[in-house]
Image (cartoon, coloured by chain):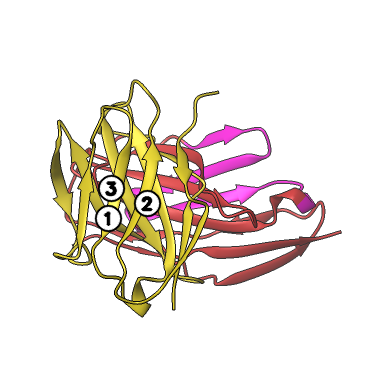
Amino acid sequence: EPEVTQTPSHQVTQMGQEVILRCVPISNHLYFYWYRQILGQKVEFLVSFYNNEISEKSEIFDDQFSVERPDGSNFTLKIRSTKLEDSAMYFCASSEVGNGELFFGEGSRLTVL
Amino acid sequence: AQKVTQAQTEISVVEKEDVTLDCVYETRDTTYYLFWYKQPPSGELVFLIRRNSFDEQNEISGRYSWNFQKSTSSFNFTITASQVVDSAVYFCALSESGSARQLTFGSGTQLTVLP
């Protein structure tokens, strides 16, 4: 069964460092998303991406964040200068059309020290 | 603005008991989608169901069933004859305007099924 894959599964970084989280969405999907979940809290929307551009973003997704689909298969989330409060599980998701089932990856746990 | 409330933070049941997880939502849209996701201890999010706002038929899938009531803005999830493997956090989510571009999640219900 096709799945969304994310790397790394866990990353530890120092505050102020740049981090790139990578995702390979399901191959025929057209919509891509990043969500995050701070430990023990709800899952929060960060950004959605369609047709090579951001279609929606939340207030969490400030100038420190960026997304890219550099090569037609990977979908990346970059955090320019990490803060302690960026520590969370980051989920990538994709969907074939923008009206229903999102397939989530297993998440990348980011720990900022 | 859309909002999803899962008032039950934690529920414990004994195996084979039935359990219902509550979800209440708020939206100003007439077209919207409701979802349930399961998050097992391993951490991934597993899609369970999607429902659109025009389809109030209850749905059953094996031991799972969903009760959608627009009149009370609720979309409750029942597990019949619960099993230990059902232990997980369950999230209800809402998307407005017929698009899943942005899912708003509830805070989740931690279900523990004891043997």
Q: Is residue A102 visible?
A: no
Q: Is residue B24 magenta?
A: no
User: Left or right: B24 with respect to A64?
Assistant: right
Q: Which chain is yellow?
A: A
Do the residues bearing badges 2 and 1 touch, measured as CB atoms within 8 Å? yes
Q: Which residue is mark 3?
A: B95
Q: Position of residue B96 (x, y in %)?
A: 22, 47
Residue that sits furthest to the top in the current view: A28
Neighbour tally class for label 3: few under 14, some 14-19, many 20 plus, Cα within 10 Å: many
- In space, the residues marked 2 and 1 are separated at their CA atoms by 6 Å
Q: Where B75 falls versus A12 (above or below)?
A: above
What quarter of the picture does the N terminus of chain B occupy?
A: bottom left
Amino acid carrying mark 3 in the image: Ser
User: Left or right: A20 with respect to A61?
Assistant: right
Whether labels 2 and 1 belong to a single chain: the reply is yes
The residue marked by circle 1 belongs to what chain?
A
Q: Position of residue B17 (x, y in %)?
A: 77, 55
The residue marked by circle 3 belongs to what chain?
B
Q: What residue is drawn where x is 44% and y is 34%?
A: B57
Q: Which chain is red?
A: B
Amino acid carrying mark 2 in the image: Leu
Q: What residue is drawn where x is 16% and y is 65%?
A: A62
The residue marked by circle 2 belongs to what chain?
A
Q: Which residues are magenta?
A: B58-84
Q: Nearer the viewer, residue A11 or B91?
A: A11
Q: Which residue is mark 1?
A: A78
Q: Nearer the viewer, mark 3 or mark 2?
A: 2
User: Left or right: A13 with respect to B87?
Assistant: left
Element class at badge 3: strand
Do the residues bearing badges 1 and 3 touch, measured as CB atoms within 8 Å? no
Q: Quadrant of residue B52?
A: top left
- In space, the residues marked 3 and 2 are separated at their CA atoms by 25 Å
